[in-house]
């Protein structure tokens, strides 16, 4: 499977036409950008272990194991030739974590190796990635 890019919401619609499948994390793409594509929306906020420690009520908005199971099912449904675009609001935390998980599942990478490849997958227009720690933790717990 080709996991070509992850990006922020502002650029997702610009790049969507070039992909076979799209994962939206917390922010829907308009229907016109989803037509003819495999599409998954996972609706959770970018809560991390630090934000939950600071404010425990944020836990209800955090990525959970069910989200990771849905993500894994979608990733496993993709054919090896399908190009995947992953986006969240900022392209900084959730989407990089989803790409790491996809690389581990589909390409047999370790989390460490997948993190190293993030810079190659990144559309070079914004922030340095900081993968969401709760998503990666939940993935490792399921694994």
Image: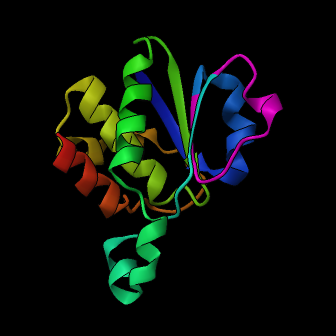
Per the image, is 109 magenta? no
Tally the numbered discs: 0
Magenta-colored stretch includes residue 35: yes
Where is residue 89, by image quadrant? bottom right
Residue 132: name its quadrant: bottom left
Q: Nearer the viewer, residue 138 or 18?
A: 138
Does 12 sit left or right of 26 as displayed? right
Percent position of residue 122, x then y: 48, 45
Query: What residue is rendered at 59% in x and 60% in y?
Result: 90
Vertical position of residue 16 compared to residue 1: above or below: below
Q: Nearer the viewer, residue 29 or 19?
A: 29
In the image, residue 129 above or below residue 100:
below
What segment carries the magenta color? 22-37
Percent x, y of residue 91: 54, 55
Q: Residue at x 32, y 61 (%)?
A: 134
The way the protein has been coloured in the rendering is rainbow
């Amino acid at each position: 499977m080709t996991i070509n890019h992850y990006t922020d919401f502002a650029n997702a619609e610009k790049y969507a036409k070039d992909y076979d499948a799209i994962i939206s994390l917390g922010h829907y793409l308009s229907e016109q950008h989803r037509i003819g594509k495999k599409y998954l929306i996972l609706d959770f906020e970018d809560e991390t272990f630090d934000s939950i420690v600071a404010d425990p009520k944020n836990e209800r908005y955090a990525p959970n194991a069910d989200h990771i199971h849905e993500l894994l099912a979608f990733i496993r449904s993709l054919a090896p030739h399908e190009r995947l675009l992953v986006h969240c609001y900022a392209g900084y935390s959730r989407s990089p974590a989803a790409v790491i998980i996809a690389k581990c599942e589909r390409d047999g990478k370790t989390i460490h190796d997948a993190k190293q490849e993030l810079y190659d997958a990144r559309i070079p227009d914004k922030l340095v990635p900081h993968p969401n720690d709760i998503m990666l933790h939940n993935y490792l717990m399921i694994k």
